[in-house]
Image (tube, rainbow, N blue to C red):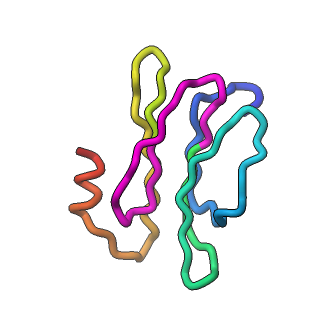
């Protein structure tokens, strides 16, 4: 990341808790955590370069997903979705997210 300075980095299976914050220099973090009881499981996060203007996108779905609109040459929406293996998911919710 230090060499290429990506605009955005997508991470899955983060196993983060809300109290965890990113201390990756030069990046903000948007995350959606997942729990089974008190145990962290799955989870997604987007790291966004501080030099890139961005706005979080609200996702009202049960999917493990985070999204952001970034302004590079134009406005682009980046969405990070984690679909756990062997776990059922609602295809309609996924299609609505894509739409």
User: Where is 63 relative to 21, above or below?
Assistant: below
21 part of magenta stretch? no
User: Where is 91 relative to 81, above or below?
Assistant: below
Of residues 69 and 90, the one drawn nearer to the viewer in this rendering: 69
Residue 44 location, quadrant: bottom right
Residue at 54% over, 69% down: 34
Report x, y in % for residue 38. 62, 82
Residue at 75% over, 26% down: 3
Report x, y in % for residue 28. 65, 39
Report x, y in % for residue 55. 48, 34
| Farthest residue, direction top | 73
Q: Is residue 63 left or right of residue 23?
A: left
Residue 67 location, quadrant: top left
User: Where is 33 relative to 66, above or below?
Assistant: below
- Specify start and end residues of the magenta stretch as a single range: 47-67
Q: Is residue 98 left or right of residue 18?
A: left
Residue at 44% over, 71% down: 85
Q: Quadrant of the C terminus?
A: top left
Residue at 72% over, 59% down: 20
């Amino acid at each position: 990341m230090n060499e290429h300075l990506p605009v955005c980095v997508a991470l899955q299976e983060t196993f983060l808790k809300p109290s965890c914050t990113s201390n990756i220099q030069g990046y903000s973090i948007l995350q959606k955590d997942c729990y089974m009881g008190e145990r962290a499981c799955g989870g997604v996060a987007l790291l966004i370069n501080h030099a890139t203007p961005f706005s979080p996108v609200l996702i009202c779905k049960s999917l493990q997903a985070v999204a952001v609109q970034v302004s590079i040459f134009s406005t682009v929406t980046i969405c990070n979705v984690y679909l756990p293996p062997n776990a059922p998911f609602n295809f309609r919710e996924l299609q609505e997210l894509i739409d």
